[in-house]
């Protein structure tokens, strides 16, 4: 017999930043809108309206390319204060239904509504009410996925957009899984998908029959997760107030950086910014990561994990600069730089107080 | 003496009286499990034999031609029953009855039918059939901790297996489905709205052909013939 049925909803706001802009400025309605940096300053698209998407404009695309695809594109500078305010209102709506709300970003969240404050026995009715209240109170539309677990709910919310509602009833899970390409899976990006295709796996369900050793050689520790997800099995709970797992920043430069000193100064600044963030949050980090994108758009990342977590700015900056030495920065023009910290640990509890030993008796 | 150890007629019923088709679940003294319902093409049968072989067929006056020696539509093997003590069961069939596609009743209730309460609107009632090697008491213990499932019936089979029938409510996405008649016959519209207020007189079951070790999955919906 299968486990208890959970009723999970994934809500994904439709083109969130662009929709907020179109809501607040009627002259933008019906027009292709991209929120992001200016093309002259090498800006990228943070979000695009559905009118812009019809031209192929997508998030993370260089704005210059977006403009080439859609010459009438209206570019709007992001205003995160307004996006955060709308997001906050939406979270309040979610929390009026259930305390089990796990925000993933400003514009998407998981809800576990198996038991909910509205007394609705089914998640479909909850999702309909959530969408209606979001529309009434924020004048924004959302798409929702209803399923027995997070993995299926998230894929379902993207199935019909905008303003969609997709329900994966237990009897429909298998038919739904059969349709999915392997890169629909959480954690499978283009690189991993390429590795899976090399061993003959195109569709998610083909992971089930794959030789476990072959799969492990291709994708490492992701193999076990993939095999479970390929069966539609995802026991991950909805965790409210999930603590941050990492912090990072990156910057695309108006002009390519050539001088190593300038590049080192940027990495140093970003690494110290991460250390300051750790200090503000009372956290420590074990892993330091940097990212370098060369002028030809080739991107490399380097990371270093230490046994002891730290928030010491000098130590973090030194490790980031050491990682930079393992790149071609200074020998190739650099378009983008980034630095981040991962592997976070809570406060001082993980490292203990130095110099104090325990004695019996 | 009856040839059947279990002989249960059941259906799903909404509070306004709308119902599913009536199903019969029975187990023979030989240890086979039969699941039947009436359809426009005679009796729709699903047979789960003690040996593990399974088949589906239509029988009755309007079903397969008499000249057809093997009436089986599909044949497959059911999954092995998990060993005793595993706390697990092997599902062999499940039927989804979406609430908003139930039909106005057309036959008299003779009082012998077990009516299962339908899920709320936008939901579906699932009735599942599974084999376990556990005794009924063990199965009740498992289901007691799974609060969303209700045990409908348990039937001990002579080979030591137990047939478990349970039900639960789940979400359902109400979408219109129109099966084209291609001009030869009328289209059939399955709609939660029932725009013509017909009561959805035509009840059909849809589902993929079962493969070995898979459970039969059926979706039962009520629809209406439409000409345009």
Image: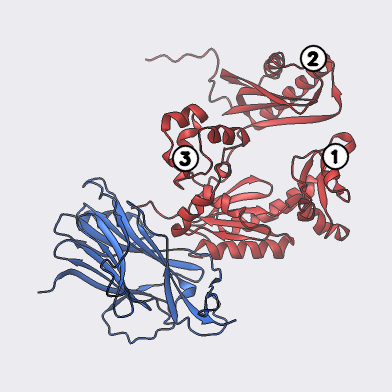
Chain colours: A red, B blue
The image quarter in which residue A208 lies? top left
Mark closest to the chain's N terminus, 3 or 2: 3
**Along the line of sight, the residue nearer the viewer: B130 or A205:** A205
Q: Which of marks 2 and 1 is nearer the N terminus?
A: 1
Q: Which residue lies furthest to the right in this view?
A: A40
Callout 2 secondary element: loop
Which quarter of the figure is the N terminus of chain B placed in? bottom left
Residue drawn at x 47%, y 34% as measured from the top left: A223
Q: Can residue A78 be seen in this view?
A: no
Q: Nearer the viewer, residue A91 or B219?
A: B219
- Say whether mark 1 and mark 2 are on the same chain: yes
Q: Mark 2 points at which residue?
A: A331
Q: Residues within 10 Å of mark 2 (few under 14, many from 20)?
A: few
- Between the C-alphas of marks 2 and 1, the distance is 26 Å
Label 3 – label 1 distance at C-alpha: 39 Å
Please provide percent x and percent y for residue A186: 56, 41
Residue with the mark numbered 3: A207
Left or right placement of residue B189 versus residue A289 in this view? left
Residue A144 vertical placement versus A288 (above, below): below
Query: Image check: B85 left or right of A26?
Result: left
Q: Mark 3 lies on which chain?
A: A
Which residue is rendered at x = 65% and y = 65% of the image? A132
Residue A85 on image: x %, y %: 74, 51
Q: Do marks 3 and 1 share a subunit?
A: yes
Same chain for marks 3 and 2? yes
């Amino acid at each position: 017999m299968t486990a208890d049925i959970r009723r999970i909803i994934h809500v994904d706001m439709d083109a969130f930043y662009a929709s907020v802009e179109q809501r607040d400025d009627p002259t933008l309605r019906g027009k292709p809108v991209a929120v992001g940096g200016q093309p002259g300053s090498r800006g990228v698209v943070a979000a695009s309206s559905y009118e812009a998407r019809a031209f192929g404009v997508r998030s993370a695309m260089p704005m210059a390319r977006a403009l080439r695809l859609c010459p009438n594109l209206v570019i709007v500078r992001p205003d995160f204060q307004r996006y955060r305010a709308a997001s906050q209102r939406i979270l309040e709506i979610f929390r009026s239904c259930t305390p089990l709300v796990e925000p993933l970003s400003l514009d998407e969240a998981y809800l576990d509504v198996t038991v909910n404050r509205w007394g609705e026995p089914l998640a479909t009715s909850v999702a309909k009410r959530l969408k209606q209240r979001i529309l009434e109170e924020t004048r924004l539309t959302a798409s929702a996925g209803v399923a027995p677990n997070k993995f299926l709910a998230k894929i379902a919310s993207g199935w019909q957009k905008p303003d969609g509602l997709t329900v994966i009833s237990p009897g429909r899970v298998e038919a739904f899984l059969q349709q999915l390409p392997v890169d629909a899976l959480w954690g499978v990006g283009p690189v991993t998908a390429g590795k899976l295709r090399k061993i003959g796996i195109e569709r998610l369900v083909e992971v089930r029959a794959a030789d476990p050793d072959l799969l492990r050689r291709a994708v490492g520790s992701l193999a076990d997760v993939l095999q479970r997800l390929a069966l539609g099995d995802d026991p991950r709970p909805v965790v409210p107030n999930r603590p941050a797992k990492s912090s990072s920043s990156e910057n695309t430069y108006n002009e390519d950086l050539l001088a190593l000193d300038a590049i080192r100064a940027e990495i140093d600044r970003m690494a110290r910014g991460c250390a300051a963030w750790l200090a503000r949050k009372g956290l420590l980090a074990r892993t330091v990561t940097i990212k370098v994108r060369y002028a030809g758009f080739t991107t490399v990342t380097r990371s270093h994990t230490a046994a002891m977590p730290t928030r010491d700015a000098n130590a973090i900056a030194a490790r980031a600069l050491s990682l930079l030495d393992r790149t071609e920065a200074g020998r190739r023009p650099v378009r983008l730089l980034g630095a981040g910290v991962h592997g976070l640990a809570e406060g001082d509890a993980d490292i203990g107080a130095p110099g104090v030993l325990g004695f019996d008796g | 003496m009856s040839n059947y150890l279990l002989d249960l007629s059941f259906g799903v019923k909404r509070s306004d009286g709308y119902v599913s088709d009536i199903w019969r679940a029975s187990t023979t003294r030989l240890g086979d499990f039969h699941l039947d319902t009436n359809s426009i093409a005679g009796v729709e049968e699903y047979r789960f034999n003690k040996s593990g072989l399974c088949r589906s067929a239509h029988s009755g006056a309007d079903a397969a031609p008499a000249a057809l020696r093997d009436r089986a539509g599909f044949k497959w093997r059911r999954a092995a029953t998990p060993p005793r003590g595993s706390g697990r069961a092997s599902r062999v069939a499940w039927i989804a009855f979406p609430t908003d596609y139930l039909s106005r009743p057309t036959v008299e209730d003779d009082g012998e039918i077990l009516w299962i309460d339908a899920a709320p609107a936008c939901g579906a009632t699932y009735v599942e059939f599974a084999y376990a090697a556990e005794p009924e008491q063990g199965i009740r213990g498992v289901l007691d901790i799974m609060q969303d499932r209700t045990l409908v019936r348990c039937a001990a089979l002579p080979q030591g297996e137990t047939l478990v029938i349970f039900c639960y409510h789940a979400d359902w996405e109400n979408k219109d489905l129109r099966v084209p008649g291609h001009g030869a016959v009328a289209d059939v519209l399955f709609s939660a709205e029932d725009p013509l207020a017909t009561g959805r007189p035509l009840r059909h079951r849809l589902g993929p052909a079962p493969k070995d070790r898979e459970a039969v999955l059926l979706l039962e919906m009520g629809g209406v013939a439409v000409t345009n």
